[in-house]
Image (cartoon, helix red, strand yellow):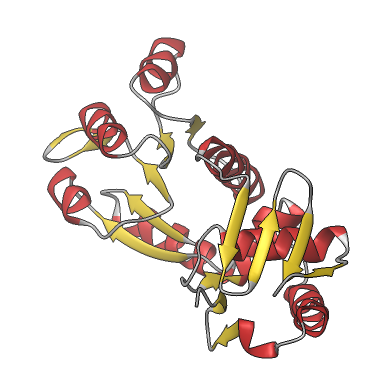
Amino acid sequence: MRILLVEDDRRVAAALSSALTRRGYEVEHAATVAAALRAAPCDLVLLDLTLPDGDGTDLCRALRRRSAQLGIIAVTARGEERDRVLGLRLGADDYVVKPFSMVELQARIEAVLRRAAHAAPERDVIEAGPVRIDVAARTVTVAGREVTLTRKEFDILVSLARQLGVAVSRDRILLDVWGTTWADRHTVEVHVGSLRGKLGDPRLVETVRGVGYRLRGE
């Protein structure tokens, strides 16, 4: 999971980046509006509204125009009601006032990412090579053979299938299936191992070293 941290205070940025990295996120730091607009694509933005080269509310508006699914959390010392309302109206999904705890921020990040994932358009049927997934009916066939999966195994398969051919991080799977990134990552490995066995071909779900897993599309 990639987070863009837009924060001009270097000490605050260093502390936040360290804490988020320990929780398994990949963090890119931008200290200005210009740097934020040049940053690589990400899953969520933590946005300070007071920046040296422009107003964070304008940046929030620009980022929202780029993507309706991008998660944006305003993280700022501006705690007055009118500031919170303005930030939300300009496209922020949530608003956190400094000082805050990492436990609170973690919970808000997970909630925003869940909402963003659910807002994305979804297909009822996904095909990946010999694998056919009927999401609505919650059924799976491999080369025409019906496969019985547990609820977690099915949800993991759907998480991988919705990003077909792309390496999906363990944290993304945890968030999609368990609703949190705090769960034991070994849990994902166990369920993926069981899923591979039931699909009948371990090569369908590839391990991407240091990242997570990828469902082959051919």
Q: Nearer the viewer, residue 5 or 190?
A: 190
Q: Position of residue 80 (x, y in %)?
A: 44, 15
Q: Is residue 86 above or below residue 157?
A: above
Query: Position of 212 compared to 63: left or right?
Result: right
Percent across and percent down for residue 110 are 62, 47
Counting labels gives 0
> For residue 197, which quarter of the picture?
bottom right
Q: Position of residue 178 (x, y in %)?
A: 76, 55
Residue 106 location (% of width, % of height): 61, 49
| Residue 69 in sight | yes
Q: Is residue 159 above or below residue 213?
A: above
Residue plotted at (26% across, 32% down): 65
**Residue ID at (11%, 39%):** 53
Residue furthest out toward the top: 82
Considering every residue shown, the one lying at the far front of the view is: 144
Q: Is residue 172 visible?
A: no
User: Foreground residue, 4 or 143?
Assistant: 143
**To which quarter of the image does residue 33 belong?**
top left
| Residue in the picture at 78% in, 76% down | 195
